[in-house]
Image (cartoon, rainbow, N blue to C red):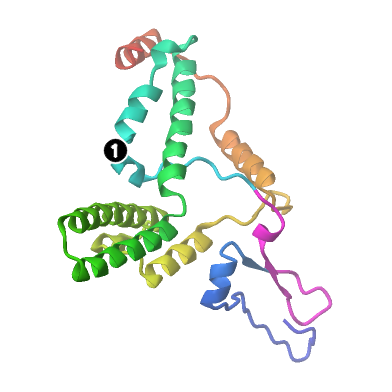
Amino acid sequence: MNNNDDDLISKRIDHAFINQVWASWFPDAYADFVEPGQSDHAACIFKIPSLRRYSRKPFKFYHHIIDHPEYPTVVAEAWNPGSIMGSNQFKLVRSMKVMKKELKKINTTHFSGISMRVKDQTVKVEALQRELLTQPNAANVVEEQRERDKLNILLTAEQKFFKQRSRARWANVGDRNTPFFHKTVTQRNTRNHIHYLRDENDNFLGTTAEIKSHAAAYFKNILRETDLFESPSTVDSLKELLPF
């Protein structure tokens, strides 16, 4: 909005255009339009949180872990609440922490850098297939089949990984490792990310700690902490439903 009272002009431009290279390098970047003050224009400021802070991401259960042959054994060994001393609630929380640690090991050991693993395994399989054309023998056939099975496992894991991250319905068609699919994942995560909040006093909350604290306080205020009246029948019914 200009500052000319005799010829007032007001235009709203609240989008900043970027290209795919920018989105790939700075997926968490966002534009902030500040107040114009004495100027005729509101400045557009690009902010890139990844360049100024690092926060540990919370644990996320990835669906491709279930397909790993070690998964049933790891779950059976990690989920052992009988060996933990304490209340049932403590046993539940402790068992979940133990299992989380073991599941993270599976993901890190076998699926970290999944796209690079797929590329490396593809190169290996293609080399074996070329060798099989020039030197067809039983040993090469067995090795090619074994490495191709590994590639299929990695391709399935990669597809599940990006499908889970993108949460796109069209992922059901089975697109594997396509640039368009990866770009869609990046764009969707950028749109869904909460970069900052403003409290009831219009204060800017930009750090992870501030956003978490404000969100917790907001819902705490809605739900309250006052204990409601508990009838004996309700407590007995819950005990029947939750025998542990």
Asked which secondary structure carries label 1, the reply is loop
Q: Residue at x 62, y 79 (%)?
A: 13
Q: Is residue 57 above or below residue 41?
A: above
Question: Would residue 175 be seen by someone viewing this image from the given angle?
Answer: no
Instruction: Tell me: 135 left or right of 96.
Output: left
Residue 135, located in which quarter of the rendered image? bottom left
Question: Residue drawn at (63%, 79%), measured in percent from left and top?
Answer: 12
Q: Indicate left or right for 68 with 138 as reference.
A: right
Percent from the top left, x then y, of residue 130? Answer: 25, 70
Q: Residue at x 50, y 10 (%)?
A: 86
The residue positioned 79% from the left and 87% from the top of the image is 4
Q: Is residue 21 above or below residue 213?
A: below
Secondary structure mostly seen in magenta is loop
> Magenta segment: does it hold 221?
no
Looking at the rendered image, the quarter that the N terminus falls into is bottom right
Q: How many marks?
A: 1
Nearer to the camera, 107 or 141: 141
The answer to whether 195 is drawn above or below residue 64 in the figure is below
135 or 157, which is in the foreground?
Answer: 135
Does residue 41 belong to the magenta stretch?
Answer: yes
Categorize mark 1 by other alpha carbons within 10 Å: few (<14), some (14-19), many (20+): few
- In the image: residue 25, left or right of residue 111: right
Q: Horizontal and vertical percent for residue 204?
A: 72, 54
Residue 23 in sight in this render: yes
Which one is in front, 74 or 137?
137
- Quadrant containing the C terminus is top left
Name the residue carrying label 1.
Answer: 69
Q: Position of residue 174 (x, y in %)?
A: 26, 62
- Viewed as shown, does residue 34 lie left or right of 132? right
- Whole-percent x, y for residue 133 in the image: 19, 70
Magenta residues, start to end: 33-54
Give the residue type at disc 1: Pro
